[in-house]
Image: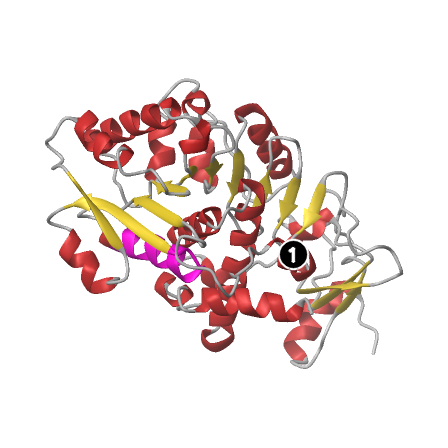
Amino acid sequence: MIVVFSDLEQERARRRDLYVVAVDLPSGLNADSGAIDPGTLAADLTVTLALPKVGLLLFPGASYVGELQVGSIGLPDDMPVEAGIVMLDDGMISPLLPSRPLDGNKGTFGKVMALVGSPNYIGAAYLVCGAAARIGAGLVTLATVRELAPYYATMLPEITYIQLPPDSSPPQERARAILEQLDGYHALVVGPGLGQAQTAAGLLDRLFAGLMALAPDKRPRLIVDADGLNYLATLDHWWHRLPPRTVLTPHPGEMTRLRGGASVSGGGADRLAVVREAARDWGHIVVLKGAYTLVASPDGSLRINGNANPALATAGTGDVLAGTTAGLLAQRMEPYDAASVAVYLHALAGRRVSAHLGDAGLLAGDLLPELPLARRDDLLDSR
């Protein structure tokens, strides 16, 4: 049965079994920008040919795509979506995963230091450290004050601790407690759950200065998220205060603040230009979170995660992503690859949870036991 476009919604209401398939892209959807015509037909399934078109992954057009599948017409699988833009998929991710040699030990698989969590955000430390451990880091250490350590120990007995001086102590003393213990650590994650009090800002100021003073071969890879980004946004030329190729993981609001108030569209084509420009100008890896998360490198390369999942739109999932990235950095992955793999496996873990729960009700902690399974599945799917 052929349905005229103008009658489609009426026909959907009348026939629950009606299934709309779009070939290449839904009619009326701009393949470059994701803009839609008023008469655009919303599909249940879009079978795009050869490569995903960028417009299929940008809103509002993405809402009209339904399930997206790529049909082969004989072009190479590793072709970019467009110049410098690559879709994250199993075939790309699996070769990047760090090896797990049989004779490895916890040192082989790297050490993560985390400056995360505070009395108002205890769960952030659990999520970050749990994710770093679940993705395969050999050792995870949390820097926290003495009174919070017992709470964390009940949630994650496997992690170790550096006890920070009290918040009332001079910030240089608090930063020194971390810097003096960093030798041998391969990744440092800061920001989630720290809060925005002046004591946190002073600690971050001294910590970032101390990292810059370290020799490059003694400096762990750095990832900054959440309140760490909020602190940076208060500084002029903040990107010069971080080691080169730091991984930054802002959501659109944090990205707006980092750019001095210049807003970021929720899903339009300008997101691609904004994140590329930011990575280039700042000299860091930028992960712009959203329904289709973007990962940009200073050299202009851009990777898109095509696995949107509304179940992940809940508090704490960004903390899990930060910890996952830190865990992969600890396993000696390069920052751009670590961020890309973290984004992909994080989404895959979310998809595994959603298979049981649906599109609502996922808790960030549900992702933790799924992360090693997502990593395993990705290896199996690539064979």
Task: Specify the amino acid type for callout 1.
Answer: Pro
Provide the residue span drawn in magenta. Answer: 123-138
* Quarter of the figure that contains the C terminus: bottom right
Tell me the crowding category of disc 1: few under 14, some 14 to 19, or many 20 or more residues within 10 angstroms, Cα based.
few
Quadrant of residue 186 in the image?
Answer: top left
Residue 62 rendering spot, x and y as whole percentages: 65, 54
Along the viewing direction, whichever of 364 and 156 lies nearer the viewer: 156
Of helix, strand and loop, which mostly describes the magenta segment? helix
Q: Is residue 214 above or below residue 6?
A: above
Residue 35 visible to an observer of this rendering: no
Along the viewing direction, whichever of 167 and 217 lies nearer the viewer: 217
Along the viewing direction, whichever of 225 and 66 lies nearer the viewer: 225
Residue 31 rendering spot, x and y as whole percentages: 76, 48
Check disc 1 and report its element: helix, strand or loop: helix
Residue underneath mark 1: 95
Q: Is residue 30 above or below residue 279?
A: below
Residue depicted at 41% across the width and 43% down the height:
187
Quadrant of residue 40 in the image?
Answer: bottom right
Q: What is the basis of the colouring in this image?
A: secondary structure
Residue 168 rendering spot, x and y as whole percentages: 10, 32
Along the viewing direction, whichever of 62 and 40 lies nearer the viewer: 62
Residue 53 visible to an observer of this rendering: yes
Residue depicted at 23% across the width and 30% down the height:
176
